[in-house]
Image: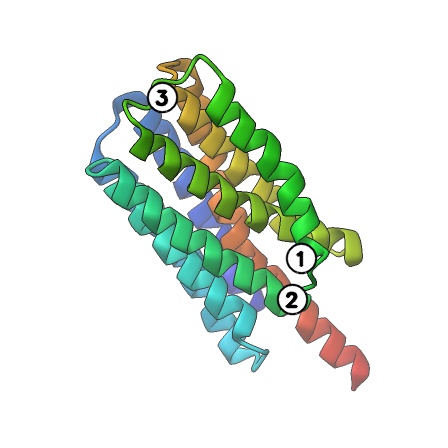
Amino acid sequence: MNKTVSILNAILLLAIIALDVVYIIIGGILIKSITSACFVLVGIVNLAYTIKCKTNLKFPIFMLVGLVFAMLGDIILEVQFIVGAALFAIGHIFFFVSYCMLIKFDWKDLIYGAVIFVPSMLFIVLAPIFDFGGILMEIVCIVYALIISFMVGKAISNYVKQKNVVNLIILIGSIMFFLSDLMLLLNVFAHLPVVGIICLVLYYPAEFLLAFSILSYTLTQTNLSDKAN
C-alpha cells in the first residue's frame, strides 16, 4: 500500500506540473479546475492511507479541508475576485489549524506572523505601483495578507520548534504559497503580467507539497509507532 500511494503521489505531481504548464500557455478555467482538483485528489489519496494506518486524523482532515477551500478559491477567483479571496482565506485558516494539530498553538507563534504581516501591509498601503480601484479591495487585500501571514508564521514556528521532514515540507509549501499570492497581487493590481507566470509556477507545487505533507505525516507516525512496538 505504501508503494502504491507513493506512485499515485508521483503520478499526480507529474499531472499537476503538466497541467500547470498547459494553463500557463493556453489558460482556461477548465484546465485550472482540473489542476486544482488534482492537488485535492492527492490529499484524498493520502488521507485514505492515513485512515488505513489508523493514524491520528486531526492534522490530515484539517489539511484536506484547507486544500478543498484553496481549490474553490482558485476556481472562483476567475469569476469573482473577492469571493475567491475569501475562500482562499478560509483555506488558510484551516491550514493554520492543521499546523496547530502538529504542535499546539502558542502565543509566541503570532510573533512570526506579525513579522511577515507588518511589512506586507505597509507594502500594500504605501507602494505607489498598486491600483486597487477603491478602498474596499485594498481592505480585502490587507485582511487576506493578515490571514496568510499568520498561516506562514505558524509554519515557521513549527519548524523552529521541531526540525523534521513534515514541518519542512509544510514550511516550504507555505512560503511558496505566500510568494505565489504576492505575485498574484502584483499581477492583478500592479498590472505586471510577467509575475503572473511566476505565481502559477509557485502555486500548484505549493499545494502539492501541502497535500503531500499528509503522507509524510502518516509515514512518520507509522515509523514512530513501529519503533515503539
CA distance for labels 1 and 2: 9 Å
Residue 169 seen by the camera:
no
- Please report the residue visible at 40 percent of the width from the left and 35 percent of the height from the top: 141
Amino acid marked by disc 1:
Val
Q: Secondary structure at mark 3?
A: helix
Q: Are marks 2 and 3 in contact (CB under 8 Å)?
A: no
Is residue 192 rendered to the left or right of residue 101?
left
**Circle 2 residue:** 102
- Please report the residue visible at 72 percent of the width from the left and 72 percent of the height from the top: 223
**Circle 1 residue:** 166
Q: Percent position (x, y) of residue 188?
A: 34, 23
Q: Of the residues under marks 1 and 2, which one precedes in the sequence?
A: 2
Q: Residue furthest front?
A: 135
Q: Secondary structure at mark 1?
A: helix
Q: Nearer the viewer, residue 23 or 175?
A: 175
Q: Of the residues under marks 3 and 1, which one precedes in the sequence?
A: 1
Callout 2: few (<14), some (14-19), or many (20+) C-alpha neighbours within 10 Å? some
Question: Which numbered disc covers residue 189?
Answer: 3
CA distance for labels 2 and 3: 36 Å
Q: Percent position (x, y) of residue 148?
A: 51, 45
Q: Percent position (x, y) of residue 107?
A: 69, 60
Amino acid marked by disc 2:
Leu
CA distance for labels 3 and 1: 34 Å
Residue 120 vs 71, above or below: the answer is above
Q: Are marks 1 and 2 in contact (CB under 8 Å)?
A: yes
Q: Percent position (x, y) of residue 1?
A: 53, 70
Residue 182 vs 204, above or below: the answer is above
Amino acid marked by disc 3:
Phe
Callout 1: few (<14), some (14-19), or many (20+) C-alpha neighbours within 10 Å? many
